[in-house]
Amino acid sequence: MPALKVPRREAEPVKRKLKKLGLYDGKRRPKREDDFVLLPVIEDERSYTLGYEVLPVELPFRPERQIYKNLESVLAERLSEDELKYLRRYDVIGDIAVIQIPPELEHRVEDIVFALRKVHPFLKVIARKGFHEGAFRIRDYSIIWGEKRLETVHRENGVEIKVDLSKAFFNPRMKGERYRLAQLVKDGERILIPFAGVLPYALVIARYRKVKITAVELNREAYELGLENIERNRRRLKGEIEFIHGDAFKVLPELPSYDRVISPTPRGVDALSLTLSKAERWLHYYDFVHENEIEAFRQRILEECQKLGRECSVRVKKVSDFKPHVFKVCADIELR
Ligand SMILES: C[S@@+](CC[C@H](N)C(=O)[O-])C[C@H]1O[C@@H](n2cnc3c(N)ncnc32)[C@H](O)[C@@H]1O
């Protein structure tokens, strides 16, 4: 497969350009070679016209894709093609794998455990995931193999995050979102994060930027894990995190406004006007929206801004599938 050989200092802008042109092959990992980076590109004539050497190299698949492929290929020996269609994506959080097993694969639990252990020999726990429940959005899990615990330390974006899936919400799939936001933030910003959980957003942003973050969380156990996470990452963090235990709807009205507010809003909670009223320049507001309602959601935000006497521009980005036709979205709102 082709890869563009680019001097290291040009790697980021060239990667952005390749993505814009639709030439970047996100399924494979770039590779550093001395003062150069090999950027994976798709087979396309345009890749050869950019002024960089194009080399034929075997760059490895990104782990999540490779992992999924491997699980499928291990199971292909044991499951029928029909059964394989029911196989869902799974997550590895620290040394715990969590997977949803639909009724159609109920009789295949042992095969799935076998395959997961084969693909990830380091696993200590395999849990079957149910649905998020209650105001604290804790998932219902049952352990189907391994040690009887749902506590682990997950590594992402250069930080360590202690989680306990039986006590607090955590979603490893938001890793890319956390990185995206950290890249948007500038040194010196004051940032507010209500609904902060065990602090994944705060830690990743403070890891990369010299900022002051105030985070708020209602679930006492998530709050305590968050405090532990600040200590655990102390020497890695450029920024500072103040963590408040309390109800965002009671705490926020007492707080000042901030350059940027990030609201990983729990499903079913409407915190738009609350969080908007605390944002001076930016609000990143997460919500769950039907694909036919995205424009109405955008209009609602514009109206809320108007009510506050603020001008704003809104860009709504689909972040992940939630259920058929419903997406988790992030509204990036710039206020003037
Ligand atoms: C969708 S989770 C996001 C957690 C975290 N930001 C993350 O991404 O892992 C929402 C969080 O809001 C918390 N929460 C729910 N209602 C709250 C409230 N009224 N005030 C503060 N936090 C609340 C829940 O306990 C949960 O940790």
Image (spheres, rainbow, N blue to C red):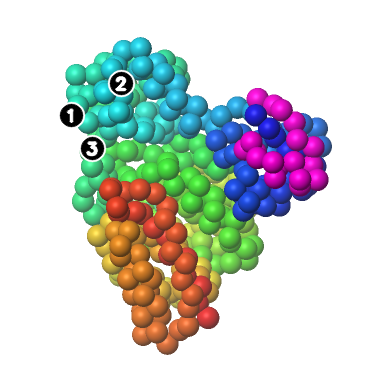
Secondary element at tag 1: helix
Of the residues shown, which amino acid type is indicated by label 3? Gly
Query: Residue placed farthest to the front in the image?
Result: 45
Disc on the earlier residue, 2 or 1: 2
Task: Pinpoint residue 75: horizontal percent, then vertical percent.
Answer: 35, 17
Q: Which residue is mark 2?
A: 81
Q: Quadrant of residue 288?
A: bottom left
Q: Which residue is mark 3?
A: 130
Q: Which residue is mark 1?
A: 103
Q: Quadrant of residue 308?
A: bottom left
User: What residue do we see at 62% from left, 53% from top?
Assistant: 20
User: Of the residues tagged 1 and 3, which is closer to the observer?
Assistant: 1
279 is higher (above) or lower (below) than 113: below
Disc on the earlier residue, 1 or 3: 1
- Left or right: residue 246 compared with residue 34: left
Q: What range is drawn magenta here?
A: 41-58
- The question of residue 281 being in magenta is answered with no
Callouts 3 and 2 close, C-beta under 8 Å: no
Q: Is residue 244 visible?
A: no
**Quadrant of the rendered image holding ligand 1:** bottom left
Secondary element at tag 2: helix
| Inter-mark Cα distance, 2 to 1 | 16 Å
Task: Pinpoint residue 182: horizontal percent, then vertical percent.
Answer: 56, 55
User: Of the residues tagged 2 and 1, which is closer to the observer?
Assistant: 2
Q: Nearer the viewer, residue 60 or 254?
A: 60
- The question of residue 55 being in magenta is answered with yes
140 is higher (above) or lower (below) than 224: above
Quadrant that contains the N terminus: top right
| Inter-mark Cα distance, 3 to 2 | 25 Å
